[in-house]
Amino acid sequence: MPGTTRAYFRRLFPWESDRYAAHLRTLTPQGRRWRFCGLLSDDALDDHAARALDTGHVEGCFLDGRLIGAFELFVDPHPPGHAQVALSVEPAHTGQGLGTEMIERARRRASLLGVPDIALMMQGDNAAMIAVARHAGASLVRAGPELGATLAVPPRDLRALPAALALDEASLVQSVTSAMLRAGRAAAARAMLAPAAMRRAGHEGGRATA
Ligand SMILES: CC(C)(COP(=O)(O)OP(=O)(O)OC[C@H]1O[C@@H](n2cnc3c(N)ncnc32)[C@H](O)[C@@H]1OP(=O)(O)O)[C@@H](O)C(=O)NCCC(=O)NCCS
C-alpha cells in the first residue's frame, strides 16, 4: 500500500461526490472502460459518483489529503444479501497493493452486513483486476467477453461491530472537517479575488464614462 504511514482509509459521504468524481476522472480511458464496462462521459461520472454515495457503501484511500483509490459495495435488497463490489485506483498508485487491500475491506464490511458472498464482474483483458480477484481467492467464470467472480465472505461476527461503528463515526468527523476546511479556503480565495475584481470593474467603468 502506498506510504502506509501517510495513507488512510475512510468512508465517503454524499456531500463528497465532487471529490469522488474527480478521483474517477483520473482513470485512463482504458481504466474507465474497465471500471464501467464501457466509456462514460465526465457528466455520467458525476452522476455515477452522486448515485453511488447515495445508495452504496463507498470507502476511499487518502494520501496527503488526496483521494487515490475507492471501492463501492452495493447490497441489493432484492434478492436480500446479494452484493457487488467495484474498485478504482489512481494510475499513479496502482501495483502497490491498494486494490487487494480494498477487496479485504469490502469483504469485512459485507460480513458485518450479513452478506454471504460478493459478486465481481471484470473484462477478460483486465489483468490487474483478475490478479486482485485471484489473490482474494475468488473463483472466476467466463461470461462472454467478461469474467464473473464470487468472493466468499466470512460469517458475521458482531464483536467487530463496535469498532466498525467507531470508524464510521471517525470518518464522518473527518469528512465534515475536511468539507468545512475546503469551503473556508474557497471563501478566503474568493475574498482575496473580490477587491481586485472590483478595482478592475471600477477601472473599466471609468474608461467607459471617460
Ligand atoms: C484493478 C485495480 C483496482 C487494481 O488495483 P491495484 O492497486 O493495482 O491492485 P494491487 O496492487 O493490489 O494488485 C495488482 C495485481 O495486478 C497485477 N497487475 C497489475 N497490472 C497488471 C498487468 N497489466 N498485467 C498483469 N498483472 C498486472 C499486479 O502485479 C498485482 O499482482 P501481484 O500482487 O501478484 O504482483 C486498478 O488497476 C484499477 O483501478 N484499474 C482501473 C479500474 C478497474 O479496472 N477497476 C476494476 C473493475 S471492477
Image (spheres, rainbow, N blue to C red):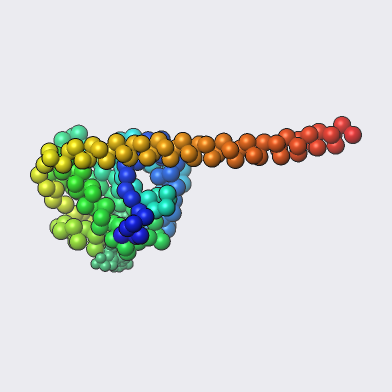
The percent position of residue 11, horizontal first and vertical second, equals: 32, 42
**Which residue ends up furthest to the right in the rendered image?**
210
Q: Residue at x 15, y 35 (%)?
A: 80
Does residue 118 sit above or below 191 in this rendering? below
Give the position of the C terminus as an image quadrant.
top right
Q: Residue at x 27, y 52 (%)?
A: 102
Q: Quadrant of residue 129?
A: bottom left
Q: How many marks?
A: 0
The percent position of residue 197, horizontal first and vertical second, equals: 71, 38
Q: Is residue 50 visible?
A: no
The percent position of residue 113, horizontal first and vertical second, equals: 17, 38
- Relative placement, left or right, of 45 versus 202 is left
Q: Quadrant of residue 135?
A: bottom left
Q: Residue at x 28, y 38 (%)?
A: 168
- Relative placement, left or right, of 150 versus 185 is left
- Relative placement, left or right, of 89 versus 22 is left
Say which of 156 and 145 sits in front.
Answer: 156
**Which residue ends up furthest to the top in the rendered image?**
209
Say which of 144 and 61 sits in front.
Answer: 61
Give the position of the N terminus as an image quadrant.
bottom left
The percent position of residue 206, horizontal first and vertical second, equals: 84, 34
Does residue 88 sit above or below 83 in this rendering? below
Does residue 107 sit above or below 50 in this rendering? below
Q: Quadrant of ligand 1?
A: bottom left
Q: Is residue 11 visible?
A: yes
Q: Residue at x 16, y 57 (%)?
A: 138
